[in-house]
Image (cartoon, rainbow, N blue to C red):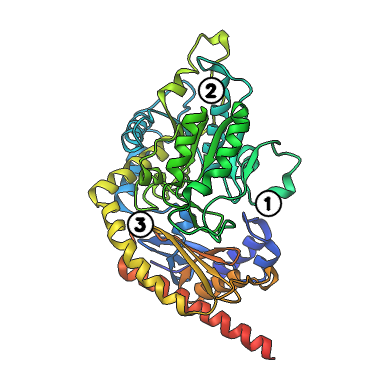
Amino acid sequence: MPKKSARSIKQLHKDARKYVWHPFTQMREWEQELPLIIDRGKGTFVYDLEGHAYLDGTASIWVNIHGHRHPTIDSAIRHQLTKIAHSTFLGLSHPSAIQLAKALVQLAPNGLEKVFFSDNGSTAVEVALKMAIQYWQQCSSPQPRKTKFIHLGLAYHGDTVGGMSLSGIESFRKPFSSLLVPEHHTVHTPYCYRCPLDLQFPSCQMACADPIETLLKRKHRDIAGIIVEPMVQGVAGLIPSPPGYLKRLHELCQHYQVLLIADEVATGFGRTSRMFACEHEGVTPDIMAVAKGMTGGYLPLAATLTTDKIYSAFLGEPHEGKTFLHGHSYTGNPLGCAAALANLAIFKTERTLAKVQRRAPKLSAFLKKLTADPWVGDIRQCGYMVGIELVMNQRTKEPFPVTDRIGYRVGLAARALGLLIRPIGNTMILMPPLSATLHELQQMVDILKDAISVVRTSTHTEELS
């Protein structure tokens, strides 16, 4: 692969600083570093303009499944281009979307029968929330009071107004407080991580869900649904739920006639070692949002799946006003659907889930090496979703001051050593493509170990000087 000239690389760096505004990035800090511009990818690696290789430790922000430039997905997109790149989905259809909807229903938890397409995780969640509220207005026994939701305290459900309103990470919400939908219910004792009740895994799920049951007893007539990231909260720092917690939420929803909405945007498509995280506890939610890995990391596409019962509440004569008035210009994009179908086919031909289930325990063994580092306060893992929390004191779990930017600095050190890994605060998030080999997984952990050591040594030197 020919490298770009020094002049063209220099111009791209200049234009990047002059014209581009990156998401979730403090641009003043970003401008102080030489921009890393990714030019191509192959397998578990991506390459910059000068040809330097980096292990993709974040699966290109949690979307890549089978590696970059997989020939099956490449071929599927090329083939679709010989037909049509895009057609409206407003009342029209096309074969790829129909086939994908069928494939998703066949893979999803039993009982999810209808698929509504959108284009990213935030919109998939937004669809779910609007769908839930309108359902209660139009179901066989209408309950128009049901307009509120319960969400967990460290939840993250996207950046649209509805998703932000039901997210619990204040730094994401605060600047937009005037836009947020008020009066939803936050339960502040979510997953068992440094549990305020001082309970122990795995016998705590009953008490852990008690606050939700207490709230439902008082407010269920106003509650449209409970939204949850099943099995693990992603942006919170990869925090797992206690065994049985999701199943109990499902039982509470059924008892109090509240919809269970599963936000599987991050956890879906094999990340937790099952196709969908709800499968771990045999739960079929009323509504399930999926995105990220659906096209294998190729094109933006999302879906919201629901039951025939909910779908039926939207059927009626046009003048009755029961139509679900939501949509996007790129809903059901044919290229995205073709990529998604190829992505799902690879799961079968390459036995992806079986490989992940075999390799995840070995990844756990590799991660144990990190526990000897005095900065590693906790390692949390669910399949190929890993959070390594960095702390000042391993015994007391005392956090680093925000101003120390330890996670950011470790990320930069890892990049210099050939690993791309993006922290959430001071928690290093390792989420490799599901296709990563055992050797590549070990390389990622070894580089991360070295990067932490580099930053710790430089910090100690700074303190002495």
Q: Amino acid at mark 2?
A: Tyr
- Mark 2: give few (<14), some (14-19) or many (20+) Cα within 10 Å: many
Residue 5 in picture, x, y percent from top left? 51, 70
Q: Residue at label 2? A: 135
Camera-near label (3 vs 1) is 1
Say which element carries label 2: helix
Q: Quadrant of residue 435?
A: bottom left
- Mark 1: give few (<14), some (14-19) or many (20+) Cα within 10 Å: few
Name the quadrant of the C terminus: bottom right
The mark found on residue 170 in the picture is: 1
For the question of whether residue 50 can be seen, the reply is yes
Say which element carries label 1: helix
At x 50% / y 68%, what residue is drawn? 378
Residue 280 in picture, x, y percent from top left? 36, 47
Q: Residue at label 3? A: 434
At x 57% / y 8%, what residue is drawn? 319
Residue 461 in picture, x, y percent from top left? 63, 88
For the question of whether residue 123 can be seen, the reply is no
